[in-house]
Image (spheres, grey):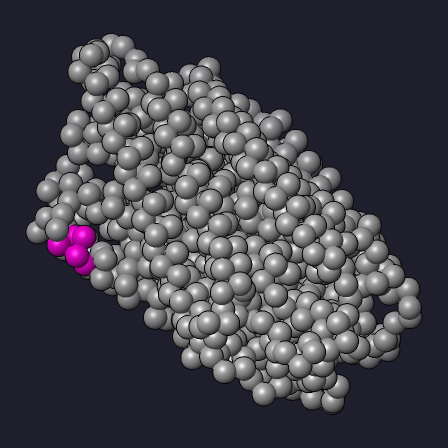
Amino acid sequence: MHLAWNAAALFWQQLPTTADSNDGKFYLWLALGVGIIALFVAAAFSRSVISQDSGTPAMQAISNAIREGAEAFLGRQYRAIGILAVVIAVLLFFGYQFTPRTKPYALYIVVSFLIGALCSALSGFTGMYVSIRANIRTAAAARTSLNRALRTALHGGAVTGLVVVALALIGIAVLFLFFGGLSDPRSVPYKLVGFGFGASLVALFAQLGGGIYTKAADVGADLVGKVEAGIPEDDPRNPAVIADLVGDNVGDCAGRGADIFESTAAESVGAMILGAALYPVFGIKGILFPLIVHAINLIASTVGALFVKCKEDENPMAALNRGYYVTTVLALIGFAAAVKFMLDGRWWLFGCGLIGVITSILFVYITEYYTETRFRPVQSIATASKTGPATNIIIGLAVGMETPAMPVLVISGALLLSYYFGVKALADITTISFYAKGIYGTAIATMGMLSSAVYILAMDTFGPITDNAGGIIEMSNQPHEIRERTDRLDAAGNTTKALTKGYAIGSASLAAFLLFSAYLEEIRTIVVDKVHAASGFVASDWSFSNINLASVPVFVGALLGAALTYLFSSLAIKAVGAAAESVIDDVRAQFRENPGIMAGTSKPDYGRCVRIVTTAALKKMILPGVLVVCLPLAVGLIFRNFSPTYAASVLANAPTINGIPVNLSGAEAVAALLMVGTIAGILLAMLMNNGGGAWDNAKKFIETGAYGGKRSDAHKAAVVGDTVGDPFKDTAGPSLHVLIKLLSTITLVLAPLFV
């Protein structure tokens, strides 16, 4: 063993730290090759899952109803999103045609936007396609073995993770190649910003529409079924039960798939833009580094998923955690190799990646603390339920407001340390500013956090698959011991869904500064090109990194950014409430019109509820999404044209054309909107995700028998609290993750219009 270790160390020391001029082509094709292979692996996983036993005819009938409802909703939703995407693409094209400076980029931006939107839609569709077929296979597998059911559900989730990250990797790599990245790598990342925008746009509507659907159905089913009728969850007598199970797929699978895709795409493009700023140091390798990290992510996560096995008496969560630890270790080894070959062995940058990995683990543990039944926050809400719904909601809201504190400390520490490590890594480079060095360090940390994204998404999709499997077992009246197996898997799935939401907001938080820095870097590049073209003056060390807080446009932009997150959340939550009212009315009407439903002598009309929720969700998702797209554009254009009246004094080293300072107020106002909107969105998303999860698990804690158990007064109060938290954790909260990154990508795309 000692000899093998020495041999490995000697081999490592002899590896080259520099590469020849063909490195760009090699790394680009390597990333593409891994992405394509990952799609074949996903197909193999999918074939393995779908080839398994699909259960009894009764189970298949329930599964088919879920599948038909989910596919109908997603088809209608994507048609609406597609029309909106085409309209925005046309507006982008003509918007870029207005000035000679932006006109050459018009076609690049539109093409990358449409491809990003298409890949994002494919990611969401793939996630749902597999999940609505894996649920019945997981339920059937649970009749024979816990391990078989666990692996079926996780492999179904792995298909989603592999396809999502592979599509992002392939899409960016192909566009980089066709946009001339090998011949002019420094300019191409700016042409790719449309890819991130298209991905973010589809993800917002997919997550928002799916979130409205799933929570409207869930709230309607719970309030009438559990509270009024006193029947169990997933009881076949509940007319909204199929709509509820459909919602798990369109919200947690399709929506989250598009969400993680846009995270991967937007953050990779942002890191590539910052890598272009360090081109004199690393060349094309610094730009392509994010693509190689995702290639490593695909390999490590595949191996991690294959390692997951569970004994019959073992906690399924322990098996899932083992897979996560294997994935993390392999990802770190691959990250170290990437730093060795691509970043000239500057090990402080590996330290940045390690910080990102540690940050993701800390976010998982913090989320677990606030949402697990064995810890103080959830137990305090459950205790408060003994005195009624009012105290449940008061304590639940207090817990939600407490939750951002620890994550903020973690993110602050991660940013400060990764910035410092970035400066240390490049201390010998005198031609690059401290700011550029530090910001690249934060970009590497973000890539480190995303290095296990495939496995994280597999665990997230595992949740709705096992939830559906439990519902199928319950509704088809399978034996109690089978339901016990699916209950254990469902409990693990509830945990993974909460943990992956914590991971998602953690990555969004760390990436927020990366994407904000990419916006500042793009504005700097645009201004420098504009000034040079007009034979003006710009200092060699000038950077667009000092946003003047004394400027009225900046302050107004900041206020609007913060207000946007609250208004958006309000619209999303109200949409759930309005759609849920329609479901409640229909469930009550069906109970009233057909007494045989409760007696078990006749079946409810499940399709009626599905159609009601589908129509309501699609109508209600439009306004919040359009608001997010339009506000940054309005702020940038208004203050670009009217800012001379309100602007504060111009900085001494400001760029000038013919002796007149370049008007930067529009770009500054948008920067303020972006930064403050991001901060407010992060804090609000943490409150909603963790607060809603705590409310949910307080109800589940009581359902284990605490404080009187099911049907007790405490349980009824906890159901009300859970109902309040549902749109928090599954609609507004996850949608805010996307909003944060959509603000960044849309400002990157529209940046030329603000100067």
The boundaries of the magenta stretch are 391-395
Residue 413: image location, x then y, percent = 47, 78
Q: Closer to the camera, 119 or 674?
A: 674
Image height of 465 relative to 93, above or below: above
- 693 left or right, relative to 751: left
- 636 left or right, relative to 192: left
Q: Residue at x 74, y 47 (%)?
A: 107
| Quarter of the image where the N terminus is located | bottom right
Residue 388: image location, x then y, percent = 10, 48
Residue 537: image location, x then y, percent = 72, 81
Q: Residue at x 71, y 41 (%)?
A: 39
- Would you say residue 482 sits in the magenta stretch? no
Q: Residue at x 80, y 53 (%)?
A: 179
Q: Residue at x 50, y 72 (%)?
A: 644
Give the farthest residue toward the left: 387
Residue 657: image location, x then y, percent = 69, 76
Instruction: Give the overall secondary structure of the magenta segment.
Output: helix
Q: Is residue 84 visible?
A: yes
Q: Closer to the camera, 538 or 417?
A: 538
Image height of 43 relative to 348, above or below: above
